Every structure is written in structure tokens, then in C-alpha cells.
Amino acid sequence: MIVVMKSDATEEQIQNAISTIHDLGYNSHIIHGVLRTVIGVVGDERGKPHHLESLSVLEGVENVVPILQPYKLASREFNPENTVVSVGNVKIGNQKLQVMAGPCSVENEEQILETANEVKKAGATVLRGGAYKPRTSPYTFQGLGEEGLKMLAKAREITGLPIVTEVLDPVDLEVVEKYSDMLQIGARNSQNYALLKLVGKSKKPVLLKRGMSTTINEFLMSAEYVLSEGNHNVVLCERGIRTFENATKNTFDLNAIPVLKEKTHLPIVADPSHGTGYWQYVTPMALAAIAAGADGLLIEVHPKPEIAVSDGAQSLKPTKFAELMQKAHAVAQAVGRKL
Ligand code: PEP
Ligand code: MN
């Protein structure tokens, strides 16, 4: 349910509506829009004696509208305006596209500093790099852990780029929060509800990747877990899904971008690196994603992809990344966005 307040509702009337919602045994999530304030009411209606429709009699309330989708706070109905998420001083979800770039894994200080400088020079606005890696094999490189986070923090100090990095396990959340500006939830953890609830309690924004076999509805339900715990700063990331096609590592679901744009107010970033698995397909799909309405890109870049410890085949060299950025400028402009 959403309680839509009148455009001239007073702060007292808003507070009164919120306390009534709490008295009835529901949680409230408030959004101050440009024109009016809306209050999301979430909780299980079963067994409760009062119908939420009765909230419409409160002073200052314009109407009470049911949200039909299973996801509530993530839905466009709840918030018709696009949500803008701040990562450091970078804003994701408005006219300007943001590009997150960096290596799959942080490997050593030289590698991350060189990559950070190169991607910044080419126009990236957020630095990415994994310090806790979800690897298919337990015998391959698992990430540098806190040492890797410290290297990312040093790269931030030098370049000024905020950092997004994956939190793989609830036990690492505190340390990842300490060093990073944005918490990445990887595809494999996309439906790890315990972890989603924990990052929902964090003050850091969340980059939520789509699971490799989750539907768009399931993806939005994962976002709902984070939002329902009070963290409204969620950016969705389409990173490809598993299909019968094996010419590419995953099938980059371009459809998901306009579909998500219709269904949710949350920003959407495209990751054609994991979406394709091969560097030569990354630029075309990055451009397609911008044309389809993505709010940003996530691109794996490595100074020497041939010796990368993970995802070398899909990593762009800095020169190729700079070319991508040039082309992306033109496409962004063609669809009324900026880069
Ligand atoms: C990554 O970003 O390096 C990563 C592991 O991505 P995903 O979770 O999408 O596979
Ligand atoms: Mn990777």
C-alpha cells in the first residue's frame, strides 16, 4: 500500500500518518518527492483487524493505493520519480551516465594504481576491483582480502574515485564497509537473503547484481530485501544470465534494461564484461546498453589482461577502454544523456 499525502500536507500530518501506520503494526518508508510525500506501508496484512484503506480518512492524506506487484518499495508505483543514488560525490540515476571500471580482482598495488589512473583519465567515475572473489573453484585465487581493500583505498586517495567492491560473506561486511564507498552483491549472492538483509541495514549504497538464473521479478524481490531493511540506495546491475547459448559466457539480457526502467525507480547499470565474457563483445554491448536506457556501465579493465588472475578474457586494455568511452559519448548524446 502507499499513502499519498496531499501536496500541501503539513509535517505534523505526515508524522501523524506515520505513527498511525506503526500503531497498526506496519513499517513505513517515506519518500519526499518533488511534488508530494508518499509513505510506503509494508507488512503482512493477514490477521490484522484494520484495513489499510481506512488511512484515507487521516488529515493530509490524498489517497491510499494498493501496490499490485510482489515487490513494493522497488516498484515505480511507489516512487514514480527516478531514484538517484550517491556513491561518494558521484550520483547514479540522473541524466549523466556513470562508469565504474577497474580489474576483476585487485592483484597488487601497482596493478590497481595503474588501472585506477588509466580509467580515471578515460572518464570513469567509480573504481571497481574485487578483494573477496566468488570463484567457481576453491583452488583458484580467492582475493587479497583486507590487503586488497587497503590497496583500493590508496587508489581512491590518489585518484579521488570512490570504490565499489564485493562483499561475499556476512563475516566480511564490517571490513568491506570500512574501506569501500559502495557494497557489491555478486550474481551468486543475488538471492542470499541473509546477506541482503544485512546490507539493507548498512549505510553504504549497494550495487546489486542480477543472479545468473533469476528472473526480473526475482531480481526485484532481491532489491526489495535490501530496501525493506531501510537502505534505499540500491543500484541494479544487469550482468547477463545463463541460457543454452555458449558462444558467449553469459547472455547479456538487453531486454532487462527497458523492462526494469518501466517496473522500478532504481538506477540500472550494465555489465557487458560478465554479460559477454569476451573483450571484443564488451564495447558493442556497452553501447547497446546506453541506447537501451542504462544509467551507467560496469567495465572490467586490466593493464595486462593476458596475465590477469581472473576474467582476463573479458577485460579491456586501458586503450580499448578509452575508445569505448569515446564511442559511449556519442551514443549517450544521441539518446539525450551525458557521459
Ligand atoms: C565481478 O564483478 O567480478 C563478479 C564476480 O561479477 P558477478 O557476480 O556478476 O559474476
Ligand atoms: Mn569479474
Image (cartoon, rainbow, N blue to C red):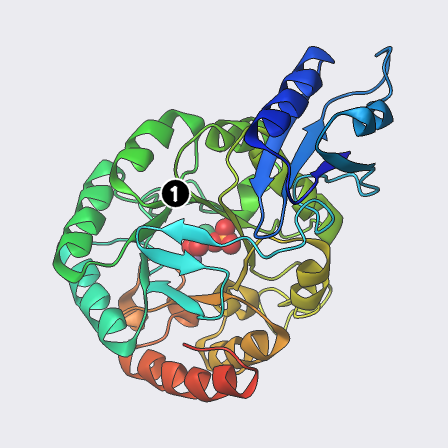
Q: What residue is shown at x 50% (from left), y 64% (from top)?
A: 271
Q: What residue is shown at x 59% (from left), y 24% (from top)?
A: 15
Q: What residue is shown at x 31% (from left), y 55% (from top)?
A: 89
Look at the numbered disc 1 and give the secondary structure of its residue.
Answer: loop
Residue 330 relative to residue 7: left or right = left
Figure quadrant of the C terminus: bottom left
Write down the residue under mark 1. 139
Residue 102 placed where, x, y %?
A: 32, 63
Residue 148 placed where, x, y %?
A: 23, 45
Using the rendered view, name the quadrant where residue 190 is placed.
top right
Residue 327 relative to residue 143: left or right = right
Using the rendered view, name the quadrant where residue 250 is placed.
bottom right
Figure quadrant of the N terminus: top right
Q: What residue is shown at x 78% (from left), y 20% (from top)?
A: 44
**Amino acid under disc 1:** Tyr
Residue 206 placed where, x, y %?
A: 46, 44
Residue 138 relative to residue 31: left or right = left
Q: Is residue 224 above or below residue 250?
A: above
Residue 303 is at least partly visible in this image: no
Q: In this view, does 295 lie above or below 325?
A: above
Residue 97 placed where, x, y %?
A: 45, 70
